[in-house]
Image (cartoon, rainbow, N blue to C red):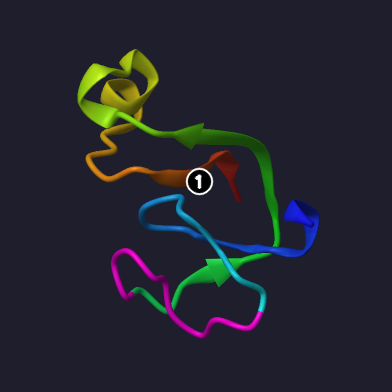
Amino acid sequence: MVADRLVCRECHRVNDPDNETCDACNSSSLTEDWAGYVVIAHPEESRIATEMQVTEPGAYALKVR
């Protein structure tokens, strides 16, 4: 389930709940306090990926606190 996942405060990437660091950027700043969920398959063709400055495909949170 998505709700129990951790999100990186640096890159907004959604990570597994047992991760201690982000899979994408290796930051240890993970949080359970986030909202919104978007899956980006083709970041080079995505306007939202451009707005979020995402260059890698994956699942991302829209708002991270």
Query: What secondary structure is marked by label 1?
Result: strand
Image position of 55 (left or right of 65): left
How many marks the image carries: the answer is 1
Looking at the picture, how far across and down is residue 2, in whole percent? Answer: 73, 53
Measuring 32% from the left and 22% from the top, which residue is drawn there?
Answer: 51
Give the main secondary structure of the magenta stretch.
loop
Q: Nearer the viewer, residue 2 or 36?
A: 2
Looking at the picture, how far across and down is residue 53, in whole percent? Answer: 26, 34
Q: Amino acid at mark 1?
A: Ala
Quadrant location of the N terminus in the rendered image = bottom right
Disc 1: which residue:
59
Magenta-colored span: 18-26
Image position of 46 (left or right of 38): left
Q: Nearer the viewer, residue 45 or 48?
A: 45
Give the quadrant of residue 16: bottom right
Looking at the picture, how far across and down is residue 31, in whole percent? Answer: 61, 66
Looking at the picture, how far across and down is residue 21, in whole percent? Answer: 43, 80
Give the quadrant of residue 26: bottom left
